[in-house]
Amino acid sequence: MKTKKKKKKKASEQSHNLLTGRLDVTRSGMGFVIIEGREQDVLVRPSDFNTALHGDTVRVRVTGSPNRSGRQQGEVVEVVDRKQMEFLGHIELSQSFAFFIAETDKPMPDIYIPLSRLNGAVNNDRVIVRIVEWEKNKKPQGEVIQIMDKGDENDKAMKEILLENGFPIFFPENVMEESERLPDIIASSEISLRKDIRGILTFTIDPVDARDFDDAISIRSLKNGLLEIGVHIADVSHYVEPETALDKEAYTRATSVYLPDRVNPMLPERISNELCSLRPHEDKLTFSTIFQMTPKGEVKQYWIGKTVIHSDHRFTYEEVQEIIEQKDGLYQKEIEILNDIAQRLRKQRFRKGAINFSSTEVRFKLDEKGKPVGIMVKESKEAHQLVEEFMLLANRTVAENVGKIKVNKKAIPFPYRVHDTPDKEKLLPFIEFAKKYGHQFDTKTPQAIAASFNQMLKDVQGRPEQHVLEQLGIRTMAKAVYTTENIGHYGLGFEYYCHFTSPIRRYPDVLVHRILHEILQEKFEIDKKLEAKCKHSSERERAAMESERAANKYKQVEYMQSFLGEEFEGVISGVASFGFWVETVEHKCEGLVSINSLLEYDDFRHVESDYSLVGKRSGRQFRMGDKVTIKVIAANLAKRQLDYEWVIATGVKGQASFSEGHPAGVKETKGKPKEKKPRKKKK
């Protein structure tokens, strides 16, 4: 008995010493396991990585007592989840074997490549390699999956960004084989199980370059005077079944990634662009929400279920916008009805507490080699809002429908899309900053905060501070995530919300479809791993956003290389202790003005609460939102970094170079500016 108790006690102690977290490897090679909810990370020496690499989720055993800083030391006992399996680098070849050396600033072992797995690569070729085997205390083994074009730096850069963020470039063979085996023809037995709406007017509205049409809208008038409007979503879950190779790969990726010159898809093109894409004049399987509505947008009843559709037309956003503006064109009457309802739904959302943040999306015009030759600002027009409002309605309706179902008096576990209320501590500096522009905030309740935000956003339209207040306001908000714990979506003003409308490019939508289908079939099984899947999907979404930001930054730097030495008007878009960022008005390209380049004018200190740098002697301010003139002095593609220099405007560009309306104004002159004397008020 004593022996058993001792064994149990030892096992308990060992399990208490095991922690799960993410391994962060420094340039020096030392590792730190960052554990959620724990202040101190765990130090791991390279000899104790046990095949773990930077970014991997690992299980670590604490092996020693804390050092002076309170940090414990440990060893990796298991790699729970690999961040990255594919790497970019070059081959070093000998007569009997080859090694792959990764091009990364994070130390990692060379990868052994058997000659049979070189796939045509020769010495010094730049390649992408996938790890296929890695036994403890041995070198990892890999295979070459692509030989890179030496002259195509853009392709290398985009792939490097994807790989760094843990997104595979290629689909494994078994995944491709599985997708190719899926049938082209829809069986009549499958159609018989679904609501057939092929005879109802249906169309898609998408970007001009889209190939994966995952949503369609149908409309018809009913005899009872109501409108029947359907939101039809590609039935990806019909083709991608749980625990298949396709499903596992889709889960690993969890999202498609949209870069300036390419899409890295969640699913193979066979599914995303062929079987599931709601192409015109083809029968397609869909999952639908169908609403009976009044012409004023009031939902009288709805139906959720599986359908088969036949799209009559494929519209681009531009085509629909022209029909709305010109009041003429194909299906003009139906588009006008849908647009009117969408605008009513939109106004109703804002009245009920949704926050009306507008965001400017910048897109690059690329030549045939992917080099940026121009920059376009994408606006959200009524055509975009038409689609957005009906997708929001479908997402909310599905979440409400599931959220109100109880099994044994408990809510069904479901992947909600939630957005928390603002953090008061993060909000207060912004409120103080907004006050300087005359905007007051009521912070008594989350609803009052939302109303204050909307009033401010309405008041700043067209004013100089509009961009800065919008951007800062967005930064104060919590990030939306996926979770089974429904706390509502604050930004949209919805009590229930989920993602149902984009299963081709988002894995949570696939999960929603599966659960919804089980509920409709009354064969529901609780997924005990659902919260972990939600967390993984949120993490992958953040990684996709990082990839998109990095790729956009690369294109900005590549574009601005043509303007070295030139001066442009800009707006201060961020401030830190080491300088301030400026976004050019003309190109929307952001670069850093280093504080070191300002030392000849004054010694500046960072005033965090005012989002500004202030000169200690002159009181001169560089404040977020201020207009300045800058010169482009460096464009480093490898670091994806633009460096600007502040230029004292001489009137040629016609803009003030520092804050106007502040106590310490400075007159524009050549050389060092002089203090500005107060003007006498005109009578």
Image (cartoon, grey):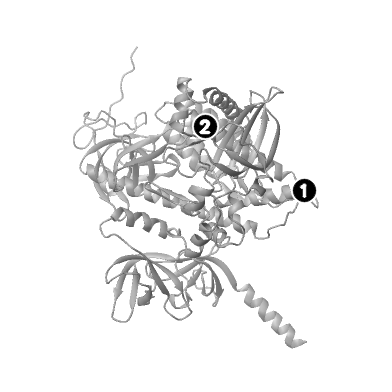
Q: Is residue 2 left or right of residue 392?
A: right
Please tell me how crowded label 2 is: few (under 14), some (14-19), or many (20+) other residues with Cα within 10 Å.
some
Q: Is residue 376 left or right of residue 178?
A: left
Coordinates of residue 651 in the picture (x, y in percent): 22, 28
Q: Is residue 179 above or below residue 497?
A: below
The amino acid on which the numbered mark 2 sits, given as a three-letter code, is Gln
Secondary structure type for disc 2? helix
**Residue situated in front as seen by the camera: 444 or 166:** 166
- Point 68% across, 48% down: residue: 516
**Residue situated in front as seen by the camera: 610 or 327:** 327
Where is mark 1, residue-wise? Answer: 406
- Point 72% across, 57% down: residue: 525
The amino acid on which the numbered mark 1 sits, given as a three-letter code, is Lys
Q: Who comes first in sequence, dot 2 or dot 1?
A: 2
Asked whether the viewer can see residue 432, the reply is yes
Q: CA distance from mark 2 to mark 1?
A: 34 Å
Q: Is residue 512 left or right of residue 57?
A: right
Coordinates of residue 663 in the picture (x, y in percent): 36, 31
What quarter of the picture does the N terminus occupy?
bottom right
What quarter of the picture does the C terminus occupy?
top left
Secondary structure type for disc 1? strand
Coordinates of residue 530 in the picture (x, y in percent): 64, 57
The image quarter containing residue 143 is bottom left
Q: Which mark is residue 385?
A: 2
Tag 2–tag 1 contact (CB < 8 Å): no
**Residue pushed farthest right?**
408
Coordinates of residue 201 in the picture (x, y in percent): 58, 31
**Residue situated in front as seen by the camera: 144 or 376:** 144
